[in-house]
Amino acid sequence: MPNEQCPISKNTAPQPWDITSKERAIFSIIVMVGAFMAILDTTVVDVIVPKLTGPLATDMYGVQWIITSYMIAAAIGLLVCEYLIKRFGAKSIYLFGVALFSFASFLCGISNDLGFIIFARTLQGVGEALIMVTSHIMIFSYFPPNKQGLAMGIFALGVSFAPALGPTVGGYLTEYYNWRMVFFINVPIGIFLVVAGIVFLPKERFFEKLKFNFVSFFLISFATVSLLIMLSRGQVLGWFSSNLIGILMFASIIGYLLYALSEINSKYKLIDFSLFKNPDFLNGILIYFFILGFSMYQYFYLLPVYYEHIKTLPTLDAGIAVFAFAVFIGIFSPIAGIMSDKIGAKYTVAIAAFIYILTSVFLLPHLNYYTPMTKAILLTIPFGIGMGMFFAPTTVLLLQSVPKHKGELAIVLMDYFRFVGGSFGTALATNNMEFFKNMHFQNMNELQNIEYVSGFLEQLKEKLGISMEQAKVLFGNYEAFMSYNYGFYNTFMHAAYWGLLGFVFVVALFVFRPKNPIKVQR
């Protein structure tokens, strides 16, 4: 039943949600816009990266560090968020995160060399981590317990809708202005948010003096950096045919093991792993990790590639095609939040996961070169519905399964698993696409009738008035394109398999129930 773990407090002391509807709306908008800006920037930048080789005097291997540095900095920044929020308050850290993100965006916009923009993107990544955790906690606190699903539905407009909108915004700004506008646009928004936050956001009253475990932080940061670099550079370097990838994997494993030993022997824990004793929290994190990170992130990566490289659409048109399903993410996010309040987070998560599995297994794999554009857009709409319904109830489920004072840590762990799972998902999509493209290319060559192909090339040569060598090159390019096209089916299906694995933990929500449900008074 809804809110069975989170009854409305009977305490007469003022609560964070004891505010007027007008104040709640103002606070929520300030917080949500910051989260929207930070998340939007991740996919907006993905669009412009290939265009930066000239302005920054580097190659594709170099500009990939623009994404990698951001991802690493954000993941490490997450690990200090709980300490900073409890020490200085969510409002202060949120406004500092927005200011840092905006300043770093300005530095990115004026960058003229690779090293400088990587430095600026690192600052941006830290800013995003601070924004995401604090905004999550703040908007959750503005709503009473019986409307926390709605709170997360509103928040999901930023977290789920923004990544899908990114290719459209990035394509538009790049095509009609220049790549620097992708960064400069954040600056006035950030200034507005900082001023509005100082003026309107409520002051916080309670702060804690905590001991920070620097040893554990260093070890898990080392392990995380090694893991994320390995995942982001693996395809480029040939995975385990590269000594560097092997070293990074070894370093990551050793780092996590040393971190575990440090936590076991430390009085002050960096992460309270007792949260995972609650099966709702454990299953919720695994659902988040596999369905969102390993599976959904693959489709986020693959769908713009499909529209640009298989349907051969310009960047802006590809962004508009992606926007078609992004609209439904925005529509169904608050709907899912309301459903969480009405029927419970568990049941809403199950409905969202079921819609997503049906879409990923039976609809998206049928996208190929021959799919009409209208049909392709229609096939992606259920994906938007499933994703729109996924984020809010999963977040509510996790936050309702931990004590109130552990809410910050729950959000940190969610976002950490999102980064790591998303990195795995993107690496898997890239690796699978390359593998299946090569597999289909080889199969096509093995099945060809040599005499028939020779005759066809002769006819092609005569009709186009080209040499035999040119005809062979033309035919080879066609084979490569079609192998790429056919490879999408297999890649889409493998992304769906990870979603099916995540669905196992959705079922586990109803099989393994907490022995002593936490009665959280938020």
Image (tube, rainbow, N blue to C red):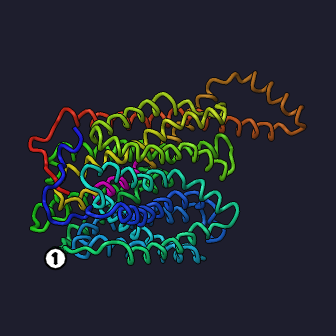
Q: Which quadrant of the figure has residue 208?
A: bottom left
For the C terminus, the image quarter is bottom left
Q: Nearer the viewer, residue 182 or 271?
A: 182
Instruction: For label 1, count other residues whose C-alpha is less than 10 Å away and answer few (under 14), some (14-19) or many (20+).
Output: few
Q: Main secondary structure of the magenta part?
A: helix
For the N terminus, the image quarter is top left
Q: How many marks?
A: 1
Whether residue 441 is visible here, answered yes or no, is no
Residue 70 screen position, x and y as percent: 44, 65
Determine whether, in the image, residue 292 is placed left or right of residue 331.
Answer: left
Query: SS class of the residue under badge 1?
Result: loop
Whether residue 19 is visible here, answered yes or no, is yes
What amino acid is found at the position of numbered circle 1 in the picture?
A: Lys
- From what the image shows, is residue 185 above or below residue 440? below
Q: Which quadrant of the figure has residue 77?
A: bottom left
Q: Which residue sits at x=57%, y=72%?
A: 184
Q: What residue is shown with label 1? A: 209
- From what the image shows, is residue 43 above or below residue 121? above
Residue 254 drawn in magenta: no
Span colored in magenta: 412-424
- From what the image shows, is residue 446 above or below residue 320? above
Residue 286 screen position, x and y as percent: 28, 44
Q: Nearer the viewer, residue 256 or 79?
A: 79
Q: Which residue sits at x=32%, y=39%?
A: 349
Residue 418 drawn in magenta: yes
Residue 51 screen position, x and y as percent: 64, 62
Q: Which residue sits at x=57%, y=38%?
A: 437
Residue 25 screen position, x and y as percent: 39, 61
Q: Nearer the viewer, residue 224 or 17?
A: 17
Determine whether, in the image, residue 70 is placed left or right of residue 225.
Answer: right
